Amino acid sequence: MATLFTVIDIIGIIAFAISGVSKAKKYKLDLFGVITLGIITALGGGIIRDCMVDRIPVMLVNVRDFYIAFFTSLITYYVFSKRRAGLRMLINIVKFSDALGLTVFIIIGANVGIEYHMGLVGTVLLATITSVGGGVIRDMLVRETPFILKEEIYATLCIIGGAIYYAGYYYHWNMATTTYAVMIIVFVCRALAIKYRIHEKAGAKKAKRR
């Protein structure tokens, strides 16, 4: 399980760093801005989570996470900044990385809740904070309404994923199997929501009602 969580953590950091870079490029930020948003998106949720459980943020103890976020942001910026084809490819990668990052950070946050012997509410809350905290900070830095407040399914998946993971611990299921189950369920649901633009359709219906 230790190896599994290490792999999950690295995947989540890379995925959300790419998402942060995409946001920075949308606003045509310079290299410093790109790297800042990449790191904040990847590590911000974990920092908030660790402060909530009164421990030193993991990124300050294990600088591996910082370096991964930093170099992912830097490489993504240079690889996809030159050509329009690269920009289109980046958009597709961001959609995939968003779903993947959400999936793995839910598991990481929920696992911290269980490590600190929290109940269902605490575990779900840490899963949600870990998953969306960095994105909230990122959006606030570029003066956007945080994504989680605009797309209901984002918060819903955090709650469902955190609850399933807690249930696995509470009922003594095999945790490796539970982890894979949460990853598959959340990733598939998020990918389908992106593919079929559920958020956009829901927004259009609300606009018509008004």
Image (spheres, rainbow, N blue to C red):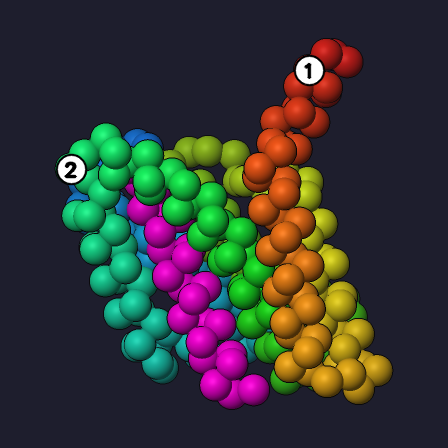
**Can residue 48 be seen at all in this image of the molecule?**
no
Amino acid type at mark 1: Ala
Task: Give the left or right position of residue 205, taking residue 10 as reference.
Answer: right
**Residue underneath mark 1:** 207
Secondary structure of residue under mark 2:
loop
Residue 68, given in percent of the width and then of the height, sits at 30, 68
Say if 113 sits above or below 21 in the image: below
**Can residue 192 be seen at all in this image of the molecule?**
yes
Secondary structure of residue under mark 1:
helix
Name which residue lies at 52% across and 34% down.
145
Name which residue lies at 71% across and 49% down.
156
* Magenta residues, dominant SS class: helix
Q: Which residue is more in the foreground, 183 or 129?
A: 183
Task: Give the left or right position of residue 124, taking residue 41 as reference.
Answer: right
Crowdedness near tag 2: few (<14), some (14–19) or many (≥20) residues, C-alpha within 10 Å? few
Q: Which residue is more in the foreground, 208 or 87?
A: 87
Say if 169 sits above or below 78 in the image: below
Q: Is residue 46 magenta?
A: no
Residue 104: quarter of image: bottom right
Question: What segment carries the magenta color?
Answer: 1-25
